[in-house]
Image (tube, rainbow, N blue to C red):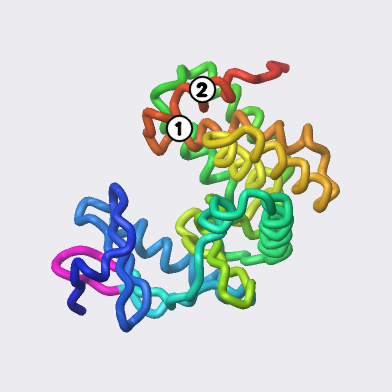
Amino acid sequence: MKLEKKDLIVKRAHKEVYKCEEGIVKLFEKTHPKADVFNEALNTARVEETGLDIPKLKEVEEIDGRWALVIEYKEGKTLEEIMRIDPDNIEKYMSNFVDLQLQVHSKKAPLLNKLKDKLARQINSLKDLDATARYDLLTRLEGMPKHDKVCHGDFNPSNVIVGKNGKMSIIDWAHATQGNASADAAMTYLLFALKDQKVADLYLNLFCKKSDTAKQYVQQWLPIVAAAQLTKNNEFEKEFLMKWIDVFDYQ
């Protein structure tokens, strides 16, 4: 497969995304771990099997020494873009967004990695936290209820494609796991809060109302998922995330 610069639609730190005849091509840097590429492919295939309407994985291939995923193209705009263009209707869009997340949480995929295992690995790898803080986070994590719902792990409006008919499709399943829906919601809340606290609060209120979940329960996950987000080594986020990790009730 030959990719051309004119087909480039997104460029990130570790990947480039192209649109071509075959579909969407996610081309990873040579330094990006091969195992992570195949894990994303496997996650996508396993989520497909749940019946969720997502862009289907077409193939995994090597292009000029770099691994690539070829994924079905879904016509439309991201929900993030639509929210930005039409802020007056944000509550309606957020309501649809939460409904879509609850649809994900209604599914099971027993072969996906377990969310608690992933979070524990991420917390153990953090060198920005001392051993005492890591121990407290791991203790809190261990005490949280074990569930087996499909969790996206990076559920935010930039990962939702809205078609012309209004139908929504979720992309980017690299972080998918099976686990506790409230942990997934806590991560989404953090991703909103990094940009706009008011929008984050709107999201959390709607999620808790629609899922009949106590807000305090989602908030119990915040220090844990904030620590997990720290592993992405984004300097702009570090101070904000450290504040959430410090909001602990040591018991």
Residue 60 locus on image (x, y percent): 32, 73
Q: Residue 113 or 152: which is nearer the viewer?
A: 152
Mark 1 residue element = helix
Q: Earlier in the sequence, mark 1 or mark 2?
A: 1
Residue type at the position of mark 1: Leu
Asked if residue 3 is among those painted magenta in the image, a careful observer would answer no
Label 1 vs label 2: CA separation?
A: 8 Å
Asked if residue 64 is among those painted magenta in the image, a careful observer would answer yes
Is residue 227 positioned above or below 44 on the image?
A: above
Mark 2 residue element = helix
Horizontal arrangement in the rendering, residue 73 relative to residue 251 (left or right): left
Residue drawn at the location 47% of the way across and 22% of the way down = 239
Residue drawn at the location 47% of the way across and 39% of the way down = 121
Residue 232 locus on image (x, y percent): 40, 38
Residue drawn at the location 55% of the way across and 72% of the way down = 54
Residue type at the position of mark 2: Met
Horizontal arrangement in the rendering, residue 42 relative to residue 166 (left or right): left
Residue at mark 2 = 242
Residue 214 location, quadrant = top right
Q: Residue 55 or 49: which is nearer the viewer?
A: 55
Cβ atoms at labels 1 and 2 below 8 Å apart: yes
Quarter placement of the C terminus: top right
Is residue 147 positioned above or below 227 on the image?
A: below
Circle on res. 13 = none
Magenta highlight range: 61-68
Residue at mark 1 = 230
